[in-house]
Image: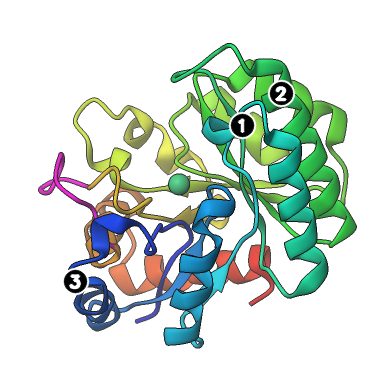
Amino acid sequence: MIITDTHTHLYSEEFDQDRDLMIQRAIKAGVSRFFIPAIDSATTQAMYTLEKSYPENIFLMAGLHPTYVKDDFEVQLAHVEKQLSERKFYAVGEIGIDLYWDKTHLPQQQTAFRTQIQLAKQYQLPIVIHCREAFDEVFAILEEEKGPDLFGIFHCFTGTHEQALQAISYNMKLGIGGVVTFKNGKIDQFLDQIAIEHIVLETDAPYLAPVPYRGKRNESSYLSNIVEKLATIYQLSEEEIAAVTTENSKVIFGI
Ligand SMILES: [Zn+2]
């Protein structure tokens, strides 16, 4: 069984004490493909180090996370652009809009999102979207940018059924993780009406651990709990869930 974690921050300092053991646990649980979203230039070196240790398993993205769009965002975007010009990445992410932490930089977040979508198109890469309390703002930009060259993943999708269909209409797959196991997570109530071809799996480790680990540090091996939950929702075997969602991730990332 090959399970693909399409969104995991394995370079996070939360894993500094036991990173290798944690990655071995994941591989043992069948989670052997890790797609690694960037935050800002401060995380670049740790990502490259990680890739060097696990070249078969680790696939990197380049991007500027919306929460880290500050007054120096143009310097950060130049860093992303330089990275993309220098070597292979598998996506531009994570990018988008986050109005939960800070609304004051909304115009800059919108500019950074648009600019990075342009970069993704230039390099024919998918985008990985981070959207928190900002569905209207994110959809407005996707509406401007939509087309055959726009595709990717709506990471940690937590919207309504209607918003799910709208995201899919922009060639986005829905990134499903720990929230689907939460009692009040809501998405489990309509997911069976979304074809599994539109779903990819993610942990967002070290955040958003699934039940029964909710509130604790998350890690990629816990993706098995998501697979189990989706097998119940879709009435498929865990092997089928793993196979189809891994295939979906290959369609998006090209690997
Ligand atoms: Zn993330």
Main structural element of the magenta stretch: helix, strand or loop?
loop
Q: Residues within 10 Å of mark 1 (few under 14, many from 20)?
A: many
Callout 1 amino acid:
Val
Q: Which residue is at the front of the view, 63 or 246?
A: 63
Query: Is tag 1's residue or tag 2's residue first in the polypeptide sequence?
Result: 1
Establish whether ligand 1 lies closer than 8 Å to the Cβ of label 2: no
Is label 1 in a helix, a strand or a loop? loop
Q: Position of residue 7 (x, y in %)?
A: 46, 56
Q: Position of residue 62 (x, y in %)?
A: 65, 58
Q: CA distance from mark 1 to mark 3?
A: 30 Å
Q: Which residue is mark 2?
A: 108
Callout 2 amino acid:
Gln
Q: Position of residue 187 (x, y in %)?
A: 38, 33
Residue 215 shown in magenta: yes
| Residue ID at (23%, 61%) | 222
Q: CA distance from mark 1 to mark 2?
A: 7 Å
Q: Which residue is mark 1?
A: 69
Residues at badges 1 and 2 in contact (C-beta under 8 Å)? yes
Query: Is tag 3's residue or tag 2's residue first in the polypeptide sequence?
Result: 3
Q: Which residue is mark 3?
A: 18
Residue 17 shown in magenta: no
Is label 3 in a helix, a strand or a loop? loop
182 sits to left or right of 35:
left
| Residue ID at (45%, 70%) | 34
Callout 3 amino acid:
Asp
Establish whether ligand 1 lies closer than 8 Å to the Cβ of label 1: no
Q: Residues within 10 Å of mark 2 (few under 14, many from 20)?
A: some
Q: Which residues are magenta?
A: 210-219
Q: Which residue is at the front of the view, 239 or 8?
A: 8
Establish whether ligand 1 lies closer than 8 Å to the Cβ of label 3: no
